[in-house]
Image (tube, rainbow, N blue to C red):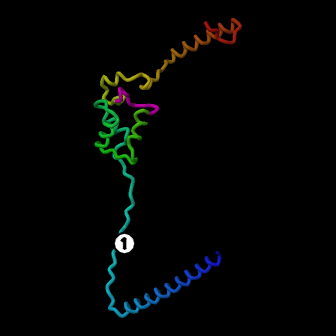
Amino acid sequence: MKIDILQQYVSAHSALLHEKAQVEARLRHINQALDQAPPTEAVTTPPVARIPRRRRRSPISMRAAVLQVTTGHPMTKPEIMAAIQKLGFRSASKNPMSSLSPLLYGKNPRFRNENGRFSPMITTTGSAEAKRTPKAVMPAKKRKVSAAGRARLSALTKARWAKIKKAGGKRLKAV
């Protein structure tokens, strides 16, 4: 069996060598014919410059666009997406709705969800809508204590600790 395979290889190899010699002879014949023919002008086309693609930049951020379109009235997610695209927002992702969800449902949401319709929690107009925003969302105002108030608090604290020490205790007792 090995002899048959070897014989097949040798015959195929010699056949390919014979075919190669015929093709080379034909190419020589064609080259000679072309050398005798008058030269023709070669038509060359200029290489086409490849312009690199740039990432599309949106003229407005998604958050700003959503705030702008939902300020007037509450909207559903598909309505919001259509409205922000109309405003000129262009997303680089294939599915821009997936980028919209974290903005609406995120850890610190800035949008109120009422039956699938979203509206901003804090409006920029200062209308009655702003007065209805939850206290947890609005930042607390920093309270300032006057010097006289701090002195009174200090005196009360010192008196309380003196009373505890006089009673022999080291801790405040629950009342």
In the image, is residue 174 above or below residue 120? above
Residue at the bottom extreme, as displayed: 36
Viewer-nearest residue: 137 or 46 = 46
Question: Is residue 74 one of those drawn in magenta?
Answer: no
State whether the magenta stretch is mostly helix, strand or loop.
Answer: loop
Measuring from the top left, give residue 18's x and y in whole percent: 51, 86
**Measured from the top left, where is residue 56 in percent x and y?**
37, 51
State which quarter of the image contains the C terminus.
Answer: top right
Q: Is residue 119 visible?
A: no
> Which residue is pictured at 39% across the width and 38% down the height?
100
Location of residue 135 (image quadrant): top left
Give the camera-side residue of 30 and 128: 30
Circle 1 packing at 10 Å, graded few (<14), some (14-19), many (20+), is few
Residue 146 place in picture, x, y as percent: 49, 18
**In the shown orientation, is residue 108 left or right of residue 70?**
right
Image spot of residue 106 (x, y percent): 44, 33
Q: Nearer the viewer, residue 153 or 57?
A: 57
Tell me if I can see residue 91 in this picture: yes
Look at 34% across and 92% down and name the residue there: 37
The magenta-colored residue range is 106-116
Callout 1: SS: loop
For the N terminus, give its image quadrant. Answer: bottom right
- Reply above or below: 128 against 68: above
Location of residue 158 by image quarter: top right
- The residue pinned by badge 1 equals 47
- Label 1 is placed on what type of residue? Pro
The residue located at (38%, 58%) in the rendering is: 53
